[in-house]
Image (cartoon, rainbow, N blue to C red):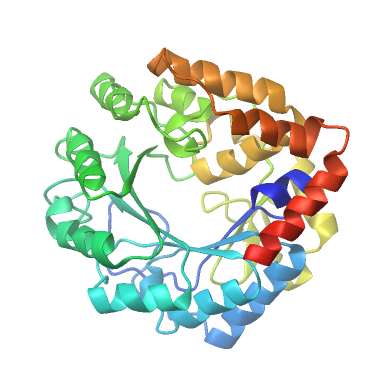
Amino acid sequence: MFARAMASKHHPILVQIVPIRRCNLACTYCNEFDAVSKPVPLPEMLRRVDLLARLGATIITISGGEPMLHPELDDIIRHIRRRGAIATLITNGYLLTPERIVRLNRAGLDYLQISIDNVIPDTTSKKSLKVLDWKLEWLAEYAEFAVTINSVLGSPVSDPRDARVIARRARELGLTSTVGILHDGDGQLRPLAADHLAIYQDLLEPDQKMFAFAQYDRFQRNIAQGLPNHWHCRAGGRFLYICEDGLVHYCSQQRGRPGIPLERYTHADLEREAAAEKSCAPFCTVSCVHQTAMLDTFRENPRQVLAEMVAARRERNPAYRPPVLLDALAWMFLDGPLKQVLSKAALRFLRARS
């Protein structure tokens, strides 16, 4: 994914696709589900994956609603992998069992994310550690794919300190822990209250991996303090959201923009929408869109981005020393006199190993 993002700026890095809008929960802050929708038929889902593959999508994330309600989810995952993309899944985790996790392994799933909102279920959310802890134990034991547990700050749960408990439990099980910040119905910022902000800062790990964007990058730091970000959103080009009706949107919170059917979406559309200015960008909290933009910023100005990342890391850990690999990547893909040759060689190598 990284090599292709560095070699070309005209394909989608990340796509979220919805196979079913229905969800088995009804979290009060969520606007991405209903209680009645039927699954998108499998042939149509496979066709949409084919269309995304033609556009060059490198990561296809299956979301919802609750995607595990789709009876043929494993077939969708297999087809994503057959078309050479990374297959990821966002789920509330309620339907996970050891047998189901093994089936996801066999289907070729690469990555799974669960957001947990509280320790004990309340009127805001049933996505609680009490309900899901045994699911996390099963994931730790059986999953062959990467697993991230995301804690959300800013929602009206009974006790925001639960985020610390959730993060600690995820790390005890050897799972990745991240923290997100709740947005409103348009994907816009709700500044964190002082107690939530203190929890957010506690959850930033001083020794986190260099490219763990979700907890670490400058977008999140500004969002946590209620500050705007000055950036160019590339949604519609580098990030796509495909709803259950097969329309292309900027993201889950900007449905209807541009609202073009996927079968009519072309490389010209990708370039036009990636270049378009979005009025929602300064106070956007949609982390996955930020991450794709960060890759392009790295592509365009690697030295500056690396310097900012290292400086931010040293704020939390003064003894931090960046790995030599970072400079090597920048030179190989972007700065070096042989960058075209090296990029092509790296792409061939990575394809051979996929």
Residue in the picture at 16% in, 56% down: 133
User: To which quarter of the image does residue 84 belong?
Assistant: bottom right
Give 332 or 69, whichever is nearer the viewer. Answer: 332
Q: Can you say whether 329 is above or below 347 in the image? A: above
Q: Residue at x 75, y 32 (%)?
A: 331
Residue 265: where, in percent of width, then height?
A: 76, 65
Point out residue 99 in the picture as x, y percentages from the top left corner. Answer: 27, 79
**Within the image, what quadrant is residue 20 found in?**
bottom left
Q: Position of residue 2 (x, y in %)?
A: 65, 47
* Relative to 91, residue 44 above or below: below
Of residue 316 and residue 120, the one placed in the foreground of this image is 316
Does residue 259 appear anywhere in the picture?
A: no
> Image quadrant of residue 231?
top right
- 214 to the left or right of 172: right
Q: Residue at x 51, y 74 (%)?
A: 77
Percent x, y of residue 348: 76, 59
Query: Residue at left 78%, top 41%?
Result: 275
**Can the viewer see residue 304?**
yes
Quadrant the C terminus occupies:
bottom right
